[in-house]
Amino acid sequence: MISRSNASILVVVFVLVTVWASYNLSSQLTAAPVTSPSSTPALTYDALGSYYYVADLAPNHLTNSTSVTGTNGTLFTSITRWINVTFLDGVTLSPATEVRLADRFVVTLSTPDWSKPLVETAQQNASSNTSGLTVTDQYDLNVSWVENLTQSIDAQLDYYPSQFEVTLAPVVAGTITLSSGEAPLLMRPFLNLTFTESYLGSLITAVGSSALQRGQIDGPAVSSDGTDGSALDYAYLFLAASLGALSVSLALFFSTRKGTKPEKLPDLDTLIEPYEEVIARTTREPRASTMLPVERWEDLVKVADTLGRPILRPVGRPTGAAGSSFYVVDGSVAYEYRYPSSRHAEETRPVPTVQPSEQNPGSRGGSKAVGVAKVVPPERSRVPPKNAGAAGVDVARLAAEQLRADMERIRSSQLSPSERTRAVVLLRRAMRVVRSASPEEIPQVLEEFHSTLDELLGESSPSR
C-alpha cells in the first residue's frame, strides 16, 4: 500500500505536469502564423570564373604566339616577351533579374623571402534586368621587366632564389537581387606563373584554377496559421493523460488519509510501570554538558540497560511545566526522554502496603486478577511501614534473593510475550510490596506471589 507521503509527492508532481500540459496546449492554439519558404525556386543561377593566357614569342610575335587555357602550360623565358592573361567572370540567370558585381584584380611578384604587388585594380560593374552578365579582366605581363625587377631586389638583399612566382588573383563579389530575396556571389579564379632556372634555361610554368558557383533564390514565403495538426493532437492527449494521472494520485492521497489514524499515546503510568525498579526519583535536573533527546521510552530503557545506569525522574516540577522528563546520565552526556503530555505529570502517590487480614486474590482458590495482594493507604495499615532491626534486614535480603531467582525463572520460561509481561509486572509489584512490608508479612507476600507465578507458569507450560 502506498504511503501518504508518497501519495502527496505524486499529487505535487502531476499538478506540475498538468499545468505544463495546459500551457503547452494553450501555446499551440494561440501560436503566431508561421512563414515557411516556398518549395519552388524563383530563380536559379550559374556563375563561372575562368582564365586563358596568350604568350607573345620572339622574334616574330605575329606568327609565334600561343594561346593556353586549362590548368597549366610551360614556356621558355628566352623566347617569351609578353604574357597576356584574360579572366572571364560570367553569371547566367533564369529568369532575368538584377545583378551587381564588384571585381578586384591583384597581381603579386614573390619569392620565399619577399613579395611585391605589381598591380591592384578595382572596377565596379552593374547591370539590371538581365539574364546574363560577363566581366572581363585583362593584364599584360612584361617578362623582361619582371626578370629585371627580381634581379634588382635580389641584389639589394644578397638573396638569389632559384625561382619566383607571379600570382594573378581576381576576386569577384556581388549579389543577385530578386523581389523575394537575394543571393551572394563570391568567386576566386587565379593563375600562378612560376619562373624557374634549370639546365635547359629559364622556364615559365603556368598553373591556375577556375571557380564555379551555383545556387537559387526561393520563391515567396508561404504563411500558415502556426498550428501543426499532429503536435496539437499530441498536446490534447498529453493533457488528458496528465489529468487522469492527477485524478488517480488524488484518490490515493485521500484513501491514505482516511486509513491513517493517529497513534494513541499510552498512559504514563502504564508506560513506566514495568520498569519501576530501575527508575530513581530525584528532586533536581541532571547536570550534563551534552543533552541527547530520545524519541521513544523503549530506547531510553535500552540505553539504561546498555550503560548499566538507573533512569532518573525529576519530581516536584514547577506548576505549569509541560510533560515529564526521564534521564540516563553517562558522564557529561545525558539522554532525555520527554513524555509529551502535561496531563501525565508526576503526581505523588501513597506507598502501598499489605493488609495481612485480606484473602489473597491471586491464590488458586480465588480469582485470577493480576496482582499479589490488596494494598491500602499507609494511614489504614496496622503493620509497621518499614523493615526494622537485624531480623528484618535478613528477611528482606532473603526475599530479594528469592525474587531475583524468580526473575531468572521468568526469563528462562517458555512464555508468550503477553504472559511474560504479566509475570514481570507481578514480580515488580511483589518487590514494591516487600520493600514496604514488615518482616512478619514478607513470607506471606512471597507465598501469595509464588502461588500466582506458579499458576501462570503452569498455564504456559508445554505439557498443558
Image: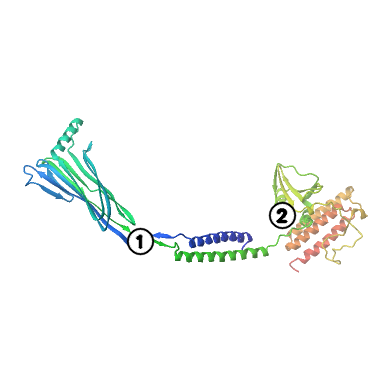
Q: Position of residue 51 (x, y in %)?
A: 19, 49
Q: Residue 281 placed where, x, y %? A: 80, 48
Residue 195 in the image: above or below residue 394: above
Please tell me how crowded label 1 is: few (under 14), some (14-19), or many (20+) other residues with Cα within 10 Å: some
Q: How many marks?
A: 2
Q: At x 79% / y 44%, what residue is drawn?
A: 284
| For residue 10, above or below residue 136 | below
Between 415 and 186, the one lying in front of the other is: 186
Left or right of 84, for residue 27? right
Callout 1, which amino acid? Ser
Which residue has dot 2 on it? 298
| Residue drawn 76% across the image and 49% down it | 325
Label ID, residue 38: 1
Q: What residue do we see at 16% from left, 50% from top?
A: 69
The answer, for residue 254, to whether it is visible in the render is yes
Which residue reaches farthest right? 382
Depth check, front residue: 245 or 121:
121
